[in-house]
Structure formats: structure tokens, C-alpha cells
Amino acid sequence: MADVDGLKVAKDYHVDKPFAKQGGFYVKGMADVDWGMKTRLSSIFNPESGRTVMLAFDHGYFMGSTAGLERLDLVIPPVLDHIDVLMATRGALRTCISPSTGKAVALRVSCGSSILKDDLSHEVIGVSIEDAVRMNAACMAVQTFVGADGEKESLDNLCKTVDAGIKYGIPTMGVVAVGKQMERTGRFFKLATRILPELGAHIVKTYYCEDFEEITAACPVPIVVAGGKKLPENEALTMCYRAISEGAAGIDMGRNIFQSLDPAAMAGAVGMIVHKNATDKEAYEYFLDMKKNN
Ligand code: 5RP
């Protein structure tokens, strides 16, 4: 293992140079994965735009009913036309969501802490690979807690999920959690978003931050950006625009969609940025027009 003292600060990210090993498959870093893995990835990342809009409503696995998600059976269906992927727990999907949505599923498979605990970083793998196959998961989502007390367990959960997923052609998405004690700095996110793909994650979910284009350049797999806490719609769309402009392969938004004044309009506006290369201002205009007409 390299001695930590001798490590020099990385600085040359070649952000102007496209990823070199595309190898005929449009999803970054996935040239050599199996056919089945590629079909699942192509159900997540639109083959035209190469990007994705994920609707995250897996918050209940540790938060219980969240504002805006009190009734999944009511709030999710109106948004479906505007998103590509459902990020959810197996329980939410089986009880509240029709199996005929035609949307890809990013199945939340890690669990183990609730908001009653001070430290959320101790999780386990809570869904068997057999049930992920049964749910026809397009990928499996595992929370990772780099720098937190549960770091090792969470990275072990990730590796075990990657190993199980490879056997069945199911990609794994490593989710970067920001523990209370972790600052949302570029330095932290550069560390976390590189560890996860090095351990085998096929997709990384993280947050937008400064120097983001260096983060996307240094991460050899697609990065999707979480929305984070609720912002005014125009500010959330600006964050989306910056993330996509700086190399994100998609947006995985929860609260900023389902707590929006008009979730369907907001999801559509995010899709304008992700799939139509709209600017944040154009997307916000789209949001206002859709909201007015809804
Ligand atoms: C919750 C999650 C969510 O999927 C992720 O944070 C995206 O949701 P939001 O946009 O509300 O942050 O990982 O643990």
C-alpha cells in the first residue's frame, strides 16, 4: 500500500479531454462489462443523450414518511412521464408503484440506520441478489460513508453488492453520503467519487460541489448528482445545469422534485437540461409554463 506521506496532491485532470476508453459503448467506463450489464445500463442512460433523470423516493428507508412522500401511490404516478429511473426501496415499489411503468429501477439495497440514530453510517445489505433479480433492478444502490465511523462496513457492502451484481449482470450504484462531520468540499468528494469506482461501482451518485468538472474527469464511471435539500426551483435548476455542463451523466433528484410546487413540471424542467441541453433559464421558463398549464 502506498505510504500516505509520499502522496502528492493530484492536479492534472485534463478536463478538456474526453474519456479515452469508450470502446464502442456510450456509458463511461463500461466498454468491457457483460452484454446484460450493458442492456441494464442502456435502460438507465438514454442512448440518445447518454444521460438520465432519476426520481429518488427511497428516503423512507431511514427517514420514514418524508414531506412530499406521505402518499407514494398518489405523488409518484403524475411524475413518471418526465423521468427515466425510479430510485426506490423494494417495499415502496411493490406496495405503491405499478409494475407496468416501463421505467428502470435503481433499487435501494442498503439499510440499517434510522434518523433516530446520531450516526447513520452503519448499514448492511438489506436486499438479496435474488430479490434484486426478481424486482428486475436495472441497478442496485448502496450508501457509502467515506470518512465516517461506518466507512469500512459501507465499502464492504458496496464490494459485496458489486460481486453479486456482476454474477447476474446488474450494475451497482455507489451513493456518496455526507456524514454530519464531513464537509461538502471538493477534496472530500474527489476522494469518495474515486474510491467507489475503484472498488467496482458502475455508477456513482454524489452532490454538486466546487471543482466538479475535476471530479467528473477523475471518476471513470458515470456520475449522477443528487438534488439535496429543497431549494427554490430556479436555484435547483441552476445546480442541475452546472452539474451537467461540468460532466455529470445525470441527475438523481428527490426533494427538489416531490417537494416542488409542481413535481411534474419540475421533473420535466430537469429533463430539458439533461436530455435537451437546455440552459437553467430555459428550463425554469419551461417549469413556469408547465406549472401554469397544469
Ligand atoms: C437518500 C438518498 C436519495 O436518493 C438522494 O439523496 C437523492 O434525494 P435528494 O435529491 O432528496 O437528496 O440517497 O438517502
Image (cartoon, grey):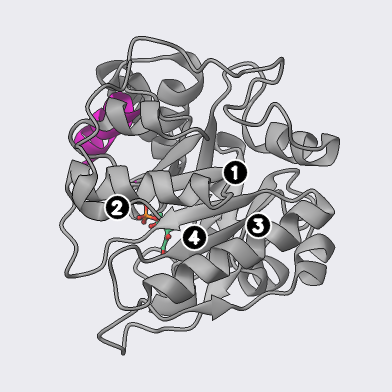
Q: Which residue is pictured at 73% across the width and 48% down the height? A: 101
Q: Are marks 3 and 1 in contact (CB under 8 Å)?
A: yes
Residue 153 picture location, percent across and down: 47, 76
Q: Residues within 10 Å of mark 3 (few under 14, many from 20)?
A: many
Q: Which of 208 and 238 is in front in this view?
A: 208
Return the disc, 2 or 3, that comes first in the chain's sequence: 3
Q: For residue 157: magenta?
A: no
The residue to which callout 2 is attached is 228
- Residue tagged by mark 3? 162
Mark 3 vs mark 4: in front: 3
Q: Residue 31's x, y, as percent?
A: 69, 26
* Amino acid type assigned to the residue bearing label 4 in the image: Phe
Q: Quadrant of residue 293?
A: top left
Whether residue 135 is situated above or below residue 86 in the rendered picture: below
User: Position of 163 compared to 293: left or right?
Assistant: right
Identify the residue at image location x=64%, y=67%.
Answer: 160
Residue that numbered label 1 is attached to: 202
- Looking at the image, in which quadrant does ligand 1 appear? bottom left
First to last magenta residue range: 227-243
Circle nearer the N terminus (2, 1): 1
Which residue is depicted at the point 38% across and 31% down?
218
Q: Mark 4 points at which residue?
A: 57
Q: What element carries label 4?
A: loop
The reply to whether the residue tagged 2 has its Cβ within 8 angstroms of ligand 1 is: yes
Q: What residue type is labelled 1?
A: His
Image location (x, y in percent) of residue 56: 48, 54
Of the image marks 3 and 4, the number of the one nearer the N terminus: 4
Which label number is shown at residue 141? none
Which quadrant: the N terminus? bottom left
